[in-house]
Amino acid sequence: MSSIHLHLLLNHVPVIGTVLGVLLLGVAVARRSDELGRVALWLFALLAGTSVLVFLTGEPAEELVEKLPGFSEALTERHEEAALVATIVLGAVGLFSLAVLAVFRKRPLARWATPVALVLSLGAAAAMGYAANLGGQIRHTEIRAATSATLNRGGNEGERPER
C-alpha cells in the first residue's frame, strides 16, 4: 500500500472521529461519567496520531492528483494550510488528553477535565470539518460548484465556479 492509498484510506478517520469524540465527551459531561470521559480522551489521543499520519501522506497524494485534469493548485494549497492547522489543533487536544489521563490515572478525573476537553474538541472538529471540505473540493467538482454558488449569492453574481 502506498502513502497515497494510506492518505485516501485514513483521511476520514480524524474528521468522523472528532465528531464521535465530541458526542462522547458531551454524554460524559451530561452523565458525569468518568469512564466515558476516559474513553473519549483516549479516542482523541489516537485521533491526534492518525491526523499526523494523514497530514504526512498528503504531499504524495498531491503529487498524484496534480497530474489529473481539473487540478487546482489554489484549492490544494488552501486544503494543505487548513489541514496543517487542523492537525495542530487536534494534536493539541490529543496531548491535553494524554496529560489528563496521565495525571488522573489512579484517581477519578477532575470535574473540569471533561468540559475543557469538550470545548477544545469542538475547535478540533470545526478545523477538521473545514479542512475536509476543502480536501473534498480537490476532486469532487460538485462540492466546488455548490461552494462557489453559495459564495456567489453574496454579491459575486456572474462569476463561474473554478474548474
Image: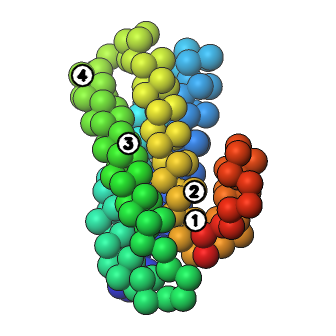
* Vertical relation: 131 (above or below) 125: below
Query: Residues under labels 4 and 2: Cα distance?
Result: 36 Å
Judge whether residue 15 can be spotted in this image: yes
Pick the front one: 146 or 152: 152
The residue identified by callout 4 is 103
Query: Residues under labels 3 and 1: Cα distance?
Result: 19 Å
Give how far across and how far down residue 33 sits, in percent.
54, 20
* Amino acid marked by disc 2: Asn
Which quadrant holds the C terminus?
Answer: bottom right
Give how far across and how far down residue 32 sits, in percent.
55, 15
Q: Nearer the viewer, mark 4 or mark 3?
A: 3
Task: Report the residue at 51% width, 32% height from top.
Answer: 122
* Amino acid marked by disc 3: Leu
**Helix, strand or loop under label 1:** helix
Decide: marks 1, 2 in contact (CB < 8 A)? yes
Ranked by sequence position, the earlier of labels 4 and 1 is: 4
Q: Is residue 53 left or right of 6 when viewed as pictured?
A: left
The residue identified by callout 1 is 136
Q: Nearer the viewer, mark 3 or mark 2?
A: 2
The residue identified by callout 2 is 133
Ranked by sequence position, the earlier of labels 3 and 2 is: 3
* Vertical relation: 50 (above or below) 161: above
